[in-house]
Image: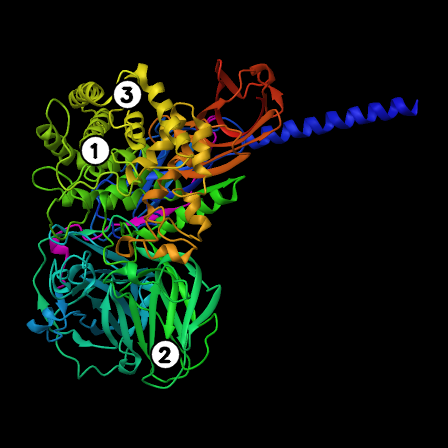
Amino acid sequence: MYTQFKKKSNLLYVVFLLTISVFANNFKENLPLEIHQLRIEYLENPQGIDVLKPRFSWVLKGDGFNRHQSAYQISVASAENKLAGPDVWKSDKITSNQTNQIVYNGKELISGKKYFWQVKVWDENGISSTSEIAFWSMGNLDFLDWKAQYISHNVGYNKKDKYKELYLPPARYLRHSFNIKKKIKKATAYTTALGLYELRLNGNKVGDDYLLPGWTDYNKRLYYQTFDITNQLTQGENVVGAIIADGWYAGYIGYALLVRLDKVREFYGVNPSFMGQIKIEYTDGTSEIIASNDKTWKANVGPILEADIIMGETYDARLEHKNWDKPGFNDSKWSKPKRYTLPNGKLMASPTSAVKNQETIRPIKITEPKPGTYIFDLGKNIAGIAKLKTQGKAGTKITLRFGEILKGNGTLLTENLRRARATDTYILSGNSVETWEPRFTYHGFQFVEVTGLTEKPTLETITGLQLSSIKTNASSFESSNSMNNTLFKNIKTTQAANFIDIPTDCPQRDERLGWTGDAQVFARSATYNADVASFFTKFAIDLDDAQRWYGAYPNFAPFPFSRPGQYSPAWMDAGIIIPYTMMQVYNDTRIVHYMYEGMQNFMKFQEKASTNYLRPGAGKNWGDWLSVNETTSNDFIASAYYGYDAKLMSEMSTAIGKTEDANKYATDFKKIKNAFSNKYILADGKTTEDSMSSYALALHFNLYPEELAQKGAARLAEKIKKNGYKFATGFLGTKHVMLALSKYGFHDVSYKLFQQTAYPSWGFSIENGSTSIWERWNSFTKDNSKNANLNAAMNSFSHYAFGSVAEWMFQYAAGIDTKSNGYRDIIIKPAISREIDFINASTKTINGKITSNWKIKGKHFYMDINIPANTHATIHIPTTKASKIKLNGDKLNKTNLHKLISSNENETIIKVGSGHYKIKAQL
């Protein structure tokens, strides 16, 4: 009897728990949607934009399953307290699940005005939720809004200086004192420079940005920044100051190895200049503007004796003008500034975030390879600057040199920097403990060599500041292979190091250019690791500005100097691939509209250069850069990319409603494909080139005849197997090899390549100590005797192009992709192989975070998937045994969380809404 009572009690308890569970789940699903990441033009609370029809976006979160937005309504007001009855714009209640690329459609926006906004959304049950209040402000929308002048200090430039081996003029200092007698309501600074600048106000730096205003083609546009400085002004005397340096405008830029040093600076101008104004609005309704000018401002030089992005910075603390940017300073010995004319380029608000210190890094160890020479190891290869903390006698010179790797004897390797001096110097004032960091330079480095110290250093002597325009916090990746996990970290480190205002090829040597081939190969990988929407918006504008008059996009952008061979196949195609990637990932068609005319001109250029729809490899051909033991012809690469461009143009034309153009480009693609296959693809599926890269490009670009594609992929797999599961590819082929293999089902081969540690492979560099992605497969080895044969002049240890494997890691290894533009319709289709035990990955998209984890355990396969609210996903489960699949603990035919699409000889496909799904299947 007791036993029966116990069974009944247990049964009642289980029923109770199930009831509570069901109630909890229902309660979760009835909670309103949460609204996060309110942004304008991809930026949170941006200051001083000049987009007249800005776009709104937000991200939704919601517990439970199948959560979605059924409608939204946006309100915009001139003050927070007016949002209840918005005086600027209140949209209709729009029945739509759209949460991004929503265009403002209210009253005309006004220069300098701050706007507040919020959005109300309704969920699938009609339950509403309202966001927090966000804001944006408009910049100076009209030329007449500007009252400031471009000013600088004459540093006594001597024409003979330009013929010096190295000419590094000092930074210029500007200041202005002004009085405020009224109560301030709002104060805004609008500032820029031809060169680089740091804005100062009452003794403090304004903002936390570096290398402002960024790099553009100054003959076409110059960006300015906007700062809310309301809380930094006081009644009485105030002082605004600026420090300016040559920067990209007048300093050294790229290719010093190939020409005289005096020929690689001053491409845009000779002397940097600053322009800025402060608009002060008072509580009594009046306002005034404090503007830079050559009458009331003062100018001088100071302790920054040299400042150059590539060469480095020299600072003599003995020459400091103490409190020069504070009230009460006597500037009677300062000069009047020199006025400069307006630049040719249009003055515009910056469309992206500035360079910032993304991470502060403490060294992991100090070595002393020679007496008095100390090497600080930061533990990873970054781009940025080093902060120095030391003390000593006045006049003591401390020298900091930077390198990515050490020689066998423990000293700094600098040969690969070529003629980039990459040296910072600090001369002590002698006043107790001194702390200094440079303002107008940056370096690519893991190691800092310090000489001249008067006492033995500690780990606190040097601190690394990792500078970047982006945060690489949008993704995660973990697998059962520790080497691959290190590879992922190295990819993110290298992306951050090279995304400094533009996507550079490398951050360390005398180059640092926006190489377009590197950028287009890595573009999609970049979107998984970071929010690069505004960053690529800026770079797309750079590409458009740099386009040659005859239609080709150049080898790098901005394009400050010309050289023989301005363009190359696979490099110039960035003008198509970058905007296409923006459309695909962010559902951004505005950038397609912006670049459309230029892209059409580029396609006309290719068409005219073609014979029977085949492109010759004309121009300066970089080819499959740094391939190993195999060559793919320039003509093959050119024709392949021409076909790919036509395909992408057809899709972009369709997206913006250009139906006639879409049909033309689709027809062009078919004709190119036919001509390409006739010339380059044989009847047995081999290419005439028979190189790994030729198969990878033709397969990934859909240039193979459908009936031969599988044979082509099989031949690629065969070649890789015969090569010991190692690459023979360079920058272009490497990205596409594994994408092509997995596209046609050769997952095992892809994973063998992915996990390879012999040369050439990613694992080889990691086995040899890499903390970043190298330019060459064999940039360095632990066997120092082999390093003597390496090409030191062309050997970057921070070069993201080979990191383009990240695209395969997410699209195939994790299986995360988008079926339609913008990740509203998600694909989860991992490449399953017993070559690896598990993959855990996530990426933050414009519609929320997607997680895809999978593992193999015995005969079973497990998936753990998170699909964000307001999206849906098609999940491919690698089993034919649909009846054996369990979804969140229930058999497929016992749950309504999905819709069964199909079950075939390879897989079972289901469609789900948002939610957290756990799948167990029998392999």
Residue designated by label 2: 452
**Which mark's residue is nearer the viewer, 2 or 1?**
1
Tell me the SS state at disc 3. Answer: loop
**Disc 3 + disc 2, Cβ < 8 Å:** no
Q: Which image quadrant is residue 686 in?
A: top left
Residue designated by label 1: 633
In the rendered image, the vertical position of residue 149 relative to residue 351, given as above or below: below
Residue designated by label 3: 704
Q: Residues within 10 Å of mark 2 (few under 14, many from 20)?
A: some
List x then y, in percent, for residue 384.
34, 60
Residue at the farthest right position? 1
Q: Tell me where the magenta segment starts and ends, as one range.
A: 123-149
Q: Residue at x 55, y 18 (%)?
A: 896
Task: Identify which residue, 203 or 31, lies in the foreground.
Answer: 203
List x then y, in percent, for residue 119.
38, 38
In the rendered image, the vertical position of residue 326 relative to residue 3, given as above or below: below
